Image: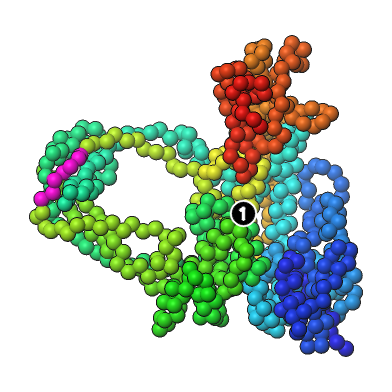
């Protein structure tokens, strides 16, 4: 009997590519049922039915009813059972129907904890528990035809259960922490003040928010300390060069002024010249964290956006699987073949020729590894019709890949030691002797290349300018996307795939604003309140330990049930502590929310009655927002103004010099900010 196999993929585009790669004629049959597309491919007498899962089709929900806490009993259900989703329902129905026609199953979702769990849940719930005994696992890192065929021919005879168990445990722990803490915070306010406002914090979001709160506290409490520096310039052959004083900072004004008076207008004498050559090895290939940080540094693209773009490039078979921690390229990679394909692009041709002419091609791999996937690399496929940001990420990955095969760069540093009336100064320069890999990666790597004229020992130099400058110590910088990712990675909280989403979630919840990140009043209140009553939620150590346990499930060093039980044991006393302090906790958070609501609504003083405030209101009938005087409540003022219906409205604290109406700022994503006064009839009014 010919075998009929159901192959479960994660996304529609990967299902299509897998069907094309596995069909012997490269022309699989496209079928549609209930608005759900699937493919039928034929290979060596077997019929392969390839379906797409549309991501997670199953989710967690509490067992039983009620809206209280703690909630420790849960079950997996189809996502459409929680929130109407006809696409997901149709997809499950079609997969369940097709599963009855086959005698074998293959999990071909992305090879990571999410992909493995997606396929497992479909197999056990849509296809039935018996399907697990007949299931195999395809593992691939690119959607290139050759890689997919190899993955098919060398698939694992069983599902990757350790990875599945790690995925299940992570979802269950995140759900338990998320739902219980959300309910605890929300009910503490509702039960005390009668205000219903959903507040939530997760097991990884808590420590991440704490980092930002601690940094903000350091910034706000920083006391500037004065110090002095010496700024000097020397003239050589008619050109000015910057001199560095031997001490970077001087603690007292007296010492700084003594140096200034002793050296100003004097001549300097070169007492020694030192030369040294430094070697800069090429960088390792990207993992997802390095790519996100570099893309933010180069293009100011958020980590979440970078991950989305990288996944799109992967699904178009332009790069390998991006959600990886590895900095090592696979030994089996046809390096020459990939380089030759990249060389078809005009901008890369000269670099590829140089690399292929090397007697030996070996990448400079990094130290980080990932058991599932290698470092990110281009497949050699040339992109077609990429958007600007997509091409930038593709170019960054491609150049980094080529650069990692380059020779080390060499740079010469020259330091001239100059004595001025008993005080020592330095004159420094550097020049690149051999750019090598830097030449390939040049758009994204900047190295100073400053040349000095020929200098000699004993040479007398004219001091052009010299003065003591008073300066003040600065507070630490706020976190941006790149620096926050680095801290999360260093502290081992979150995963390569979740860190960007965690940052985005904190922004979405109103705990963070802007970039660099500044904690909001609400975010600050959450951290302050939790640190009093349940500091474990903000603990890096607690989260890190849990992350290590979750990771060890994949290596079969610990049982998943044991990890979930340990997490519940950690959470239960936290919830009891919140319950015990519910009234105080609710009052503190409620006060912050009340102040914020008032602050968010207020735009400025009413120009008509001068006693009320112009606030943002909503028309109950139309649902449209407008601005009006809050004295409308007592009938003493009816002043009102129309407002734009899109964008975030912020008060500027300024009033129009012409009509005295408040001036507001409107922020719409992707557009320039819009500043204007509220009065439509004001002579200064711009059209909007």
Residue that appears at 82% across and 28% down: 620
**Principal secondary structure, stretch drawn in magenta:** strand
Quadrant of the image occupied by residue 639? top right
Residue that appears at 56% across and 43% down: 210
Instruction: Please check the rendered image and state whether residue 446 is part of the magenta-colored stretch, yes or no.
Output: no
Residue that appears at 80% across and 59% down: 58
Q: Quadrant of the N terminus?
A: bottom right
Quadrant of the image occupied by residue 317? bottom right
Question: For mark 1, what is the residue?
Answer: 304
Q: Quadrant of the C terminus?
A: top right
Residue 404 visible at all: no
Name the spot of residue 600 as percent of width and height, x first. 65, 29
With 665 as the anchor, is 56 left or right in this view? right
- In the depicted view, which residue is nearer to us: 544 or 281? 281
* Mark 1 crowdedness (10 Å alpha carbons): few <14, some 14-19, many ≥20: some
Residue that appears at 60% across and 17% down: 660
Secondary element under disc 1, as helix, strand or loop, is helix
With 97 as the anchor, is 354 left or right in this view? left
Q: Start and end of the magenta stretch?
A: 460-466
Quadrant of the image occupied by residue 152? bottom right
With 244 as the anchor, is 562 left or right in this view? right
- In the depicted view, which residue is nearer to us: 505 or 444? 444
Residue 500 visible at all: yes
Name the spot of residue 249 as percent of width and height, x first. 28, 42
Name the spot of residue 603 as percent of width and height, x first. 64, 24
Colour scheme shown: rainbow
């Amino acid at each position: 009997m010919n075998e009929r196999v159901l192959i479960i993929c994660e996304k529609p585009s990967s299902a299509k590519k897998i069907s094309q790669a596995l069909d012997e004629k490269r022309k699989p049959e496209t079928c549609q049922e209930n608005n759900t597309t699937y493919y039928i491919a034929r290979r060596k007498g077997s019929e392969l039915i390839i379906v797409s899962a549309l991501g997670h089709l199953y989710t967690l929900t509490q067992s039983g009813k009620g809206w209280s806490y703690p909630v420790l009993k849960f079950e997996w259900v189809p996502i459409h059972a929680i929130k109407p989703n006809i696409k997901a329902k149709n997809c499950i129905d079609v997969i369940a129907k097709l599963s009855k026609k086959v005698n074998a199953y293959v999990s071909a979702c992305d090879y990571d904890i999410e992909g493995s769990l997606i396929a497992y849940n479909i197999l056990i719930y849509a296809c039935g528990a018996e399907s697990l005994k007949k299931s195999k696992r395809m593992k691939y890192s690119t959607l290139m035809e050759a890689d997919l065929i190899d993955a098919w021919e060398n698939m694992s005879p069983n599902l990757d259960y350790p990875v599945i168990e790690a995925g299940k445990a992570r979802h269950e722990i995140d759900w338990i922490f998320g739902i219980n803490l959300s309910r605890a915070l929300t009910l503490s306010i509702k039960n005390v003040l009668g205000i219903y406002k959903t507040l939530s914090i997760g097991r990884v979001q808590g420590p991440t928010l704490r980092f930002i709160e601690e940094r903000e506290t350091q910034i706000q409490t920083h006391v500037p300390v004065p110090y002095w520096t010496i700024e000097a310039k020397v003239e050589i052959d008619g050109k000015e060069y910057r001199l560095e004083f031997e001490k970077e900072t001087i603690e007292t004004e007296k010492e700084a002024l003594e140096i200034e008076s002793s050296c100003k207008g004097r001549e300097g004498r070169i007492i020694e010249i030192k030369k040294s050559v430094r070697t800069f090895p090429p960088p390792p290939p990207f993992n997802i964290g390095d790519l996100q940080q570099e893309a933010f540094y180069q293009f100011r693209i958020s980590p979440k956006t970078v991950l989305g773009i990288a996944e799109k490039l992967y699904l178009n078979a332009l790069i390998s699987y991006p959600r990886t921690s590895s900095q090592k390229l696979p030994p089996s990679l046809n390096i020459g073949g990939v380089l030759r394909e990249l060389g078809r692009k005009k901008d890369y041709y000269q670099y590829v020729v140089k690399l292929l002419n090397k007697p030996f091609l070996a990448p400079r791999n990094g130290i980080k590894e990932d058991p599932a996937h290698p470092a990110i690399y281009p497949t050699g496929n040339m992109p077609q019709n990429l958007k600007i940001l997509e091409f930038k990420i593709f170019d960054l990955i491609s150049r980094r890949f080529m650069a990692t095969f380059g020779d080390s760069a060499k740079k010469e540093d020259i330091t001239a030691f100059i004595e001025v009336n008993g005080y020592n100064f330095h004159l420094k320069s550097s020049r690149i002797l051999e750019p090598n890999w830097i030449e390939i990666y040049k758009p994204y790597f900047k190295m100073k290349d400053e040349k000095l004229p020929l200098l000699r020992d004993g040479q007398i130099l004219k001091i052009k300018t010299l003065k003591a400058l008073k300066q003040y110590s600065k507070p630490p910088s706020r976190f941006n996307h790149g620096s926050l990712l680095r801290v999360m990675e260093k502290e081992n909280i979150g995963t390569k795939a979740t860190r960007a989403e965690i940052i985005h979630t904190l922004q979405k919840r109103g705990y963070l604003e802007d970039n660099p990140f500044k904690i909001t009043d609400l975010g600050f209140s959450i951290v302050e309140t939790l640190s009093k009553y349940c500091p474990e939620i903000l603990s890096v150590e607690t989260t890190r330990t849990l992350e290590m346990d979750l990771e060890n499930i994949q290596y079969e060093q610990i049982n998943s049930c044991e990890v979930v039980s340990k997490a519940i044991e950690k959470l239960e006393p936290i919830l009891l502590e919140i319950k015990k302090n519910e009234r105080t906790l609710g009052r503190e958070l409620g006060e912050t929310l009340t102040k914020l609501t008032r602050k968010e609504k207020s735009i400025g003083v009413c120009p008509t009655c001068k006693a009320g405030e112009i606030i943002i209101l909503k028309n109950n009938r139309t649902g449209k927002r407008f601005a009006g005087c809050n004295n409308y409540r007592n009938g003493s003022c009816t002043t009102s103004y129309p407002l734009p219906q899109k964008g975030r409205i912020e008060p500027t604290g300024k009033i129009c010099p012409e009509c005295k109406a408040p001036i507001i700022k409107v922020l719409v994503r992707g557009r320039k900010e819009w500043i204007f006064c509220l009065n439509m009839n004001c002579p200064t009014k711009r059209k909007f």
